[in-house]
Image: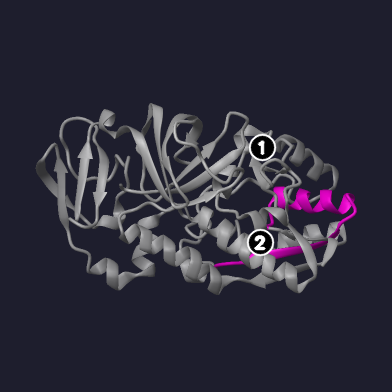
Amino acid sequence: MNDKRVIVAMSGGVDSSVAAALLKKQGYDVIGITMKTWGFMEVGGAPKFESGCCSLDAIFDAKNVADVLDIPHYTVDFTKAFEKSVIDNFVEEYLSGRTPNPCVVCNRKIKWEELLKKADSLDAKFVATGHYAIIEYNEKERRYTLKHSEDNPKDQTYALWGLTQESLSRTIFPLGNMKKTEVRKLAEELGLKTAAKPDSQEICFVADNNYERFLREKIPDVINNLQEGDIIYHGKIIGKHKGIPFYTVGQRRGLGVAVGKPVYVKKVDSTLNIIEIGDKEELLQKDVKALDVNYVSRAELKKGEIVFGKIRYSDKATAAEVIYSDQNKIHVRFIDPKNAVTPGQSLVLYDGKGYLLAGGVISNN
């Protein structure tokens, strides 16, 4: 396997463009790969002009950058794997009353597992992306570690907690110690077309950010046969909901009920087919449990130790005590309560120095 050959996942954005440029400058044999994982014809919701990940514009932008950098570029069809691992999981989670984070699944199952297979076929030792994160090797722990990026607002470690030790051992993050402003400036200096391209915001395959539209078009027979259920507030039925998949913890708008003050979804119960709502302060909780755990910078957590946890990408990491942990489950108790802890989202834990210790999928119990 060629230790100087690296496959760069080029999305057509500025970050992966600069990542490829930096690696070439460092002497690597760089191959650009754009992963075709979905299309607007299959998922709907196309804007007037298709843009963003997996659009033709994105593929052409990546190809243009590769030409400027004088590196080979290929577009690889991962649509079947993406459909099975990411989109099907997304649909199943919503039908079960949970709110998934497809980026976490995609990173582990597609951007790494599938990309590493492609790297093997091209005799490449490494894969690289434009993620803002830092990989190190801890001799004492004998583990690869994942550390919070220097550019805190753009740090992406939260969505990378599912990466295995094998994946981390073959990954390079060239932008880990850079700030976004530096990346854009470098892209401009290199004459890259993507220098001023805006960042993507929504889930890639739901470009219009309309999950209800996506589900209705993706599984119309299932959605059309959903049963209405009760909306409960403080033990009393105050209305009917239109279907479990259309509600998420913390939701305020679109509830179709009025109690004279703002109320929020407190619990989505697919077993009993009810939506429980409550006042804002009722959404606060200290205890959070997660399943499907992956340990990253350490092999275990110790009962009673203090860690710093996030319950969503935009959340601030705050102090929590480890109540219980094993290879599949973690239970922590936050010092200050978190707002709207949502089953299906990720609980990600760090130490005081910014190393990602472990992550898991938030569970109902």
Give coordinates of residue 358: x percent, y percent.
53, 44
Which quarter of the figure has residue 76?
bottom right
Residue drawn where x is 17% and y is 38% of the image: 258
Q: In the image, which is nearer the foreground, mark 1 or mark 2?
A: 1
Say which label, 1 or 2, has the lower sequence index: 2
Residue 48 visible in this rendered orientation of the protein: no
Q: If the image is split into quadrants, where does the N terminus sit?
A: bottom right
Give coordinates of residue 150: x percent, y percent.
69, 33
Residue drawn where x is 58% and y is 28% of the image: 352
Give the number of the disc on residue 149.
Answer: 1
Q: Is residue 299 above or below residue 85?
A: above
Whether residue 237 sits left or right of residue 152 in the image: it is left
Cα gap from disc 1 to disc 2, whole angstroms: 29 Å
Query: How did the renderer colour the structure?
Result: one colour
How many residues crowd around disc 1 within 10 Å: few (fewer than 14), some, or many (20 or more)? many
Question: As rendered, which of 347 and 274 lies closer to the eye?
Answer: 347
In magenta segment, residue 19: yes
Q: Is residue 165 above or below residue 261?
A: below
Give coordinates of residue 168: x percent, y percent.
67, 53
For the record, the magenta segment spans 11-38
Q: Residue furthest left?
A: 236
Give coordinates of residue 96: x percent, y percent.
31, 59
Which quarter of the figure has residue 170?
bottom right
Q: Which residue is mark 2?
A: 57
Whether residue 275 sits left or right of residue 89 in the image: it is left
